[in-house]
Image (cartoon, rainbow, N blue to C red):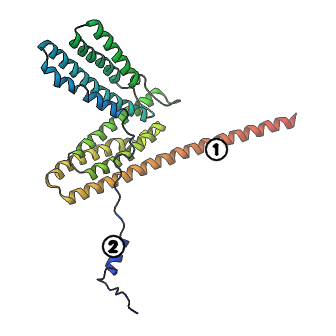
Amino acid sequence: MAKRYGGEFSPQGESSRESVSAPPARPLEASFKGRAPARHGAKINLLFIAPLGVFLTAFFQPTVAMVTDLAGGAVLLLAAWLLRDGIRAEDAYNERKVARRPAIPRKIFASILTAVGVGLLVFGGQWNPASALIAAAVAGALHLFIFQPDPMKDKGLEGVDQFQTNRVARKIEEAEAVLEAMKDAIHRARDRQLEARVDGFQATVREMFRTVEDDPRDLTGARKYLGVYLQGARDATVKFADIYGRGRDPQVRADYVTLLDDLETNFSARTQRMLLDDRSDLDVEIEVLRDRLNRDNLIHERGQTHE
């Protein structure tokens, strides 16, 4: 009977078995890991597109009407831009357990600007102040009703003093700014896989954020990670984007991916240690309460025996 040859250089040979047994490469994280879809994305896009028609028709009108329409269209674009930033700030606020209210109520200002923009467009078409005011009021009210006002108060943990809450919120805001700078830098490399890899690393970092928010006492142990190490990751990303963007050197790319792997491993390990410490603290509290309950029950039983 015929038998398949299985020599060293055959397709099923030793070298092929070695390649199969080699460890697989680390899979790239999805770019949307840890991120929810943008809220009101389609509505905001329409608010950016709608004023563009004004710029196309304004130049076929008399000078005063043209200026009025152009001003109204520009104000509506500014309102859409403020609304988009306001929703992003609100999403970040809702995602965190400890957060300060947005410094600027962008969504409220966007509603006001929408009212002004619609009022200018109506006034420029009819030259009727009453109609313009009514249309502006309706547009502003509908805008505020649909998108809702900005968060107007700080958010913290119950039982945690305000100083600790502000301390955690301030540190996480600074760390988020570093992550945004890191993301902006990797975009310059023009490599989608690396952008996805950076998003995966940032998701791991944000898990540490949530752990610190759950227990502000963890901030002391995480301070070096949220400061020195995170800033070092940003600086390395900036330098990598500059070098890789010029030469597309695969070795430079491999070194940068290895750095991200090491950083992510260390951040994840530190987060797990903080969770274990929190569990240990809980176990200690439970044991203390059990001992106290047992002691109180024993005293109560002795009292009943003497009676």
Up/down of 14 relative to 227, above or below: below
Can residue 131 be spotted in the picture? yes
Mark 2 to mark 1 CA distance (whole Å): 53 Å
The part of the image, by quadrant, that contains residue 248 is bottom left
Question: Looking at the picture, how far across and down is residue 139, in whole percent?
Answer: 33, 18
Q: Position of residue 271 (x, y in %)?
A: 44, 47
Which residue is disc 2 drawn over? 19
Q: Residue at x 36, y 21 (%)?
A: 143
287 to the left or right of 241 = right
Residue 148 visible (yes or no)? no
Mark 2 or mark 1: whose residue is earlier in sequence: 2
Residue 307 quadrant: top right
Q: Nearer the viewer, mark 2 or mark 1?
A: 2
* Drawn side of residue 131 relative to residue 39, left or right: left
Decide: is 25 above or below 292.
below
**Tag shown at residue 287:** 1
Instruction: Please report the residue visible at 23 percent of the width from the left and 45 percent of the height from the top.
Output: 187
Residue 151: give its label. Answer: none
Q: Secondary structure at mark 2?
A: helix
Type of amino acid under label 2: Ser
Query: Residue at left 39%, top 49%?
Result: 267
Q: Residue furthest bottom?
A: 1
Tag 1: amino acid: Glu
